Amino acid sequence: MSILVNNNTKLLVQGITGRDGQFHAGKMKEYGTRVVAGTTPGKGGEKIHGIPVFDSVEEAVRKTGANTSVIFVPAPFAADAILEASFAGIDLVVAISEGVPVQDIIRVTPVLKQNGTRLIGPNCPGLITPGESLIGILPGTIFKKGNIGLMSRSGTLTYEVVNMLTKNDLGQSTVVGIGGDPVAGLYYLELLEMYENDPETEAIVLIGEIGGDAEEQAAEYISRHVTKPVVSFIAGQTAPPGKRMGHAGAIISSGSGTAEEKIKAFGKANVPVAKEPSEIPRLLKEKLANAVI
Amino acid sequence: MKIHEYQAREIFKRYGLAVPNHVLCHTVDEVEQAMKNIDHLVVIKAQVLVGGRGKAGGVKLAKTKEAAVQAAQQILGMDIKGYKVEKVIVADAVDIEHEYYVGLINDRNTKSVTLMVSAEGGVEIEEIAKTNPEKIHKISINPQIGLLDFQARNIGMKLFGNVKLARQAARIFQKLYQIYMETDSTLAEINPLVLTPSKELLAIDGKMNFDDNALYRHPEILALREVDEDEQKEIDAREKGLSYIRLNGNIGCMVNGAGLAMATMDMIKLYGGSPANFLDIGGSSNPRKVVDAMNILLSDKNVQAVMINIFGGITRGDDVARGLIEALNTIKTNIPIVVRLSGTNAEEGLAMLKETGLTTVSTMSEAAQKAIELSGSKN
């Protein structure tokens, strides 16, 4: 087990002939992900790294049985690509594209719900179940199969933490980059529920940052519904208010969305918050040791 | 992206919302000119891209030309929360029976556009949310069908308890929603929406913010952008693929990735230092980007040490090191630079960097401590 992706994931790469799509399709295949198809309108019939390219998602799904897609198309076309995947019957869509207008995601959200499609991202690095399936732009070499579930709004900060987990012999069940945009697909609450129900996940790491109140809601949810140990880290304690810190969603507006409030909420929920990323392995080990007793 | 009140008023008018007339003035003379054709009560309002103008003395009523000129003299040039007032509007004042709040936002939690209204207008919505949250009425709008007549009317009834006014208000809510969607707003407020004694509803103040990621499809909105010096630097950086925000400290940071960049700033603070900036160079080892980033960092005269924090992922550490060496060869500076490299092929990268005389470390904590030490500023 694991969550969202595994050996049965058959991946389609939307925008496979673009620079990033092409490069990462190769990396994912190299990692062992079952990359069964790619799409780029007008490039049907070509092959990229031996992966067949189709003109439409509908055709790719019909001919290859792809059930998950990853999107590398430029931001202005991302919403259309997400919907194309959804209407073609794809179960899970992972949107890597950065800079997608918020209202595009607001418009696709109810349609995805009607079609029963799950979305991760946009503006995210993707997700991985180590040893089984890597989807997106994550560097495969730093991950190790294991029992820690990790979710994060940030890419490189995730790598930083995963690298330390792996070095401390704390492998991962599934790591999900949920993305840095204010409105995005699957978020903490849905993922916490999945990790809680996943027998392979023994403890959870939640990496948050300033902006919005999703971490506060997660803290509340954890105290009510999560029995597994959770450890967190919040980035942006020194961020000035009113400024967008790289991610569209990382902004303190009118005094809300501060790191301080989030840290306080986790404190209340008995979730330790690491002062710096390197503390996370120790905090996890302590939590896990206590959980066994 | 933010715009001024007068710009929001003009957008509102274009869409047919009832807004009192105003004249934009940059000088006291212009105010005097504007008053030549006016013989009624006006309000002189500072135009700055920050809230709290009223409390700061940036909004004044005037009955006569002399009073208007005097008010303009006081307001023009005034500093409001660090923003210098360079223009004012002379707007028709209206009789107020009651003030209401109307606002639209992108709600992260419901993943929808949400309409918020309150009978406690004229104050900031965050204040109402803190003191009287029950006095805010909200509705999430389904983008497939928009804000329906009955929804708009029902929320209007909550404010007015009178169907005639509720219908009038409903048209305003729907119009504001149309503006919001057609311009890719992230915030659209009418605060206050005023009920006059003759039972008219007028928008007497407007605030709009727009999605930076959607500006590519709204050249008419982009044309309204006004930026100060710091923001210009941020925009220039963005054009080079960098995300930069200046702070007040003395340790410059250069990091790949936004989350890691925030964590780096936090770590500098944690060890007693003070970060000079947020700088995310994105996921590339392109030497050009490193050079651009260093030039931006070093243009800040407060910077006394630089901490470069790179996690090599898909981009390998040795490639990153090559990029850094190439970039740093073209930059002449005496400012100490600490480089931390981790992740894929980090050891090879660090070995290459050692030969350059740069201070190299392998963890973030070490890098932060070293940078603080070299800046000689531990406080």
Image: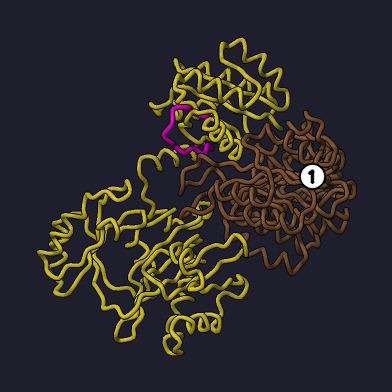
Q: Which of B18 and A75 is in front in this view?
A: B18
Q: Residue at x 43, y 81 (%)?
A: B169
Image coordinates for residue B276, horizontal then vertical, percent? 45, 31
Q: From the image, which quarter does the C terminus of chain A lie in?
A: top right
Color style of the picture = by chain
Residue B164 can be seen in this image: yes
Chain to which mark 1 belongs: A
Q: Which chain is yellow?
A: B
Give the farthest residue toward the left: B66
What is the crowding at mark 1: few (fewer than 14 residues within 10 Å), some, or many (at least 20)? many
On the image, numbered disc 1 is attached to which residue? A203
In the image, taking residue B239 as reference, residue B353 lies left or right, namely: right
Q: Residue A253, relative to residue B131: is it above or below?
A: above
Evaluate whether residue A126 shows in this view. no
Q: Position of residue A133 (x, y in %)?
A: 84, 43
Count of numbered circles in the view: 1
Task: Using residue B282 as the reference point, say whether residue B188 is left or right of it.
Answer: left
Q: What element carries label 1?
A: strand
What's the residue at 65%, 55% (across, down)?
Answer: A184
Q: Where is residue B300 in the image (x, y as percent from the top left)?
A: 40, 29
> Is residue B242 shown in magenta?
yes
A222 or A82, which lies in front? A222
The span shown in magenta is: B240-254
Q: Is residue B156 left or right of residue B97?
A: right
The hue used for chain A is: brown
Residue B195 part of the magenta segment: no
